[in-house]
Image: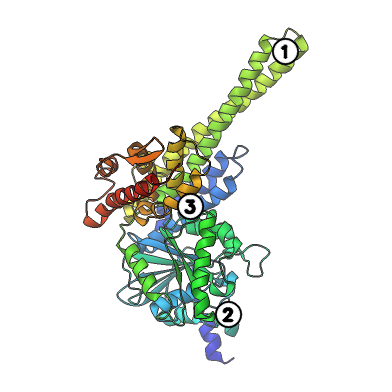
Amino acid sequence: MDSINYTTAFNLVSKIVQNGEGESFLQDIAGLNKIINTDLPEAMKDYAPSNFAEIYSDFKYTFEKFTDFILFDKLIGKNTVTLGGGFSTGKSSFINALLKNRMLPSEIDPSTSVPTYVIHGAKESAIGINVFNKKVDLAIEELKIISHGFTSEYNVKFGHLLETIFVETPEQPFKSISFLDTPGYSKPESENYSKKTDENIARTQLNSANFILWFVSAEEGTITDEDIKFLQSLNSGIPFAVIVNKSDKRAESDVSDIVGLVKQNLTNRGIFPLDVIPFSCRYPEKFGKEQIQKLLANWNKQEYASTFARDFKILFVECIEYFEEQIRNESRRLNWINTGMTFSDIPEVNEAFTNLSNEIKIFLKNYRDKEKNLKEIKDLFFKEIKSVADKYGIEMPEPSELDLLSFKSLDIFNLVRKNKDKRGIKTGDYFHILQNQLTELQKNEEILVWGQKYSKIIEDTITEQLVIEDGALNMHVSSSGSIRSNLGGNFLPVEENNKLFTQTIRKNLRNTINRQNQKEY
């Protein structure tokens, strides 16, 4: 290798690992870092739900994404379309095909993959965030060097040096969308496994998205069982589509069969994508380009809905609910012990009851203290995060508005099913009927988009408006107005494209009801 190549390698590595004085934002988030890295673990020590490690990891990732928005403020106001799927299913190649420019790494070791945001910009530019949280300006040529052959040619890996890459290019046509290209997921036993492709990390990345494109390979013949299980573990309130990539590697007659099989397998498992689209990075005009552009153009028109508050809220809600459940359980145990003591006149038995009672009282005090402490940490955290968000122009509700946000997905099937059960309509196959009749409503994009933020309000309103009597579904005439009224002007803007939301709910409900009323329960 000549000296120029060695010089290129050395200079680029030196540039990436520069530390310097650090960014001023580190001072702004110092209080939040203390809460996340010190106060929360201490508060949950010895008294945590079994899934705390998982939800704490999700919480920390959400904060990392929040800092991404600070470091690269051009992400603010853009809905994130996250590319997911197994490792090497062609996610980066898809972006390159979209950009008509082989800019991102598409053939790279999984351990060196770097999550990359791609947004529209007036000119091509790139910024990397290194392991010291320092921004590094990268020339496009340097990005291409990282992308193509640098590891094999210079024996230098960058995945351990860069945390995130941000790319601006006029070739990305969707101005209100940021694409997030992730390394994908793989299981520990897979040869493609690395820390960066760990399925828990991939799940967290996807659950923080506004929209998801899920990639499968046409070479597999259908979607794998591992992919289906992974999709089932994601927040079902996030709209997503499946891209059957590498379709050019199968006979054209096979591609439509593969698409149909993917749809069928997903539907059979209760998963409802907005679409399943064949695609080829080599021949996009021939496979799926028009469908994908139409889908993305629709997402590009959707109003930005920040998920930070919702995602931060999950940890606090689940831990507080855990404490409340433990308090209820211990209180029941204490009542049983006290009842037992009233019926016993044996000193030894009463002594054992007393010891148990004292032990339970200690548990109750600890759980109540933990719950009180966690609520105080929650209030402090959201006060701090609101202050930082306001400084950097990131959407964040007032702490008093947090109760309006729901992190649970909008499930139309269970919503209608509960109404049927509540009204005593008995039929053994009602879920099958609902599944067939409500599929379009469940996967309706407008409902899913707004359901990410206000699913509880929408659920309550739809429940109020549904009338199930005499074995038939009906709906109040005022449903559209009630939904709009309950959401209120602060939640649902009045622009024409957003008026479609309530109109679509009403239209789909009426169509569903008309079909359902023709069925014999």
* Residue 350 on image: x %, y %: 72, 12
Q: Which mark is residue 151?
A: 2
Q: Amino acid at mark 2?
A: Thr
Front: mark 3 or 1 = 3
Which quadrant holds the C terminus? Answer: top left
Q: CA distance from mark 2 to mark 1?
A: 73 Å
Question: Does dot 1 land on a helix, a strand or a loop?
Answer: helix
Residue 257, above or below 371: below
Q: Is residue 163 visible from the viewing direction of this image?
A: no
> Circle 1 sits on which residue?
350
Q: Which mark is residue 235?
A: 3
- Mark closest to the chain's N terminus, 3 or 1: 3
Outermost residue toward the top in this view: 345
Residue 116, above or below 272: below
Q: CA distance from mark 2 to mark 3?
A: 36 Å
Question: Does dot 3 land on a helix, a strand or a loop?
Answer: loop
